[in-house]
Amino acid sequence: MTEFGHEALRRRRCECGAADCDAVIEMTWAEQDRADHVDGRWAIHPEHTPRGGRRWSVVEQTDRYVIVEVEEEPPS
């Protein structure tokens, strides 16, 4: 598929939650959909750990990104 097609890689910011994180990950639209359309899922850099959640687990992992499902802390 062309660079403008559904499988083209798109750049986006890591969602690990670290205040100083400026990492960029690359995902296709389909990969982004798997992360963005489920509450509690974050797309992070493969070398990062999610911050701000009570618990988390890996849903999908590649050499370009990791999708984690995070159980967030309840509001205080």
Image (spheres, helix red, strand yellow):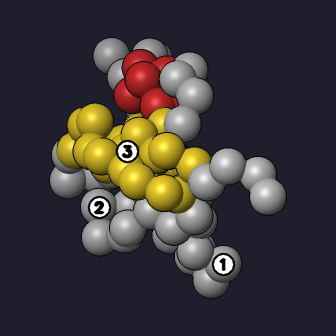
Left/right of residue 27 with respect to residue 46 in the rendered view: right
Q: Amino acid at mark 3?
A: Val
Q: Residues within 10 Å of mark 3 (few under 14, many from 20)?
A: many
Residue position marked by numbered label 2 in the rendering? 46
Left/right of residue 32 with respect to residue 47 in the rendered view: right
Q: State the quadrant of the C terminus.
A: bottom right
Q: Nearer the viewer, residue 39 or 19?
A: 39
Check disc 1 and report its element: helix, strand or loop.
loop
Mark closer to the observer (1, 2): 1
Q: Amino acid at mark 2?
A: Pro
Q: Quadrant of residue 15?
A: bottom right
Residue position marked by numbered label 3 in the rendering? 68
Up-down: is 62 above or below 20?
A: above
Residue, x 48% and y 57% (percent of image)?
A: 54
Residue position marked by numbered label 1 in the rendering? 19
> Counting residues from the N terminus, which is met first, the one under dot 3 or under dot 1?
1
Mark closer to the observer (2, 3): 3
Q: Amino acid at mark 1?
A: Ala
Q: State the quadrant of the N terminus.
A: top left
Q: Residue furthest right?
A: 76
| Residue 37 in view (yes/no) | yes
| Residue 32 in view (yes/no) | no
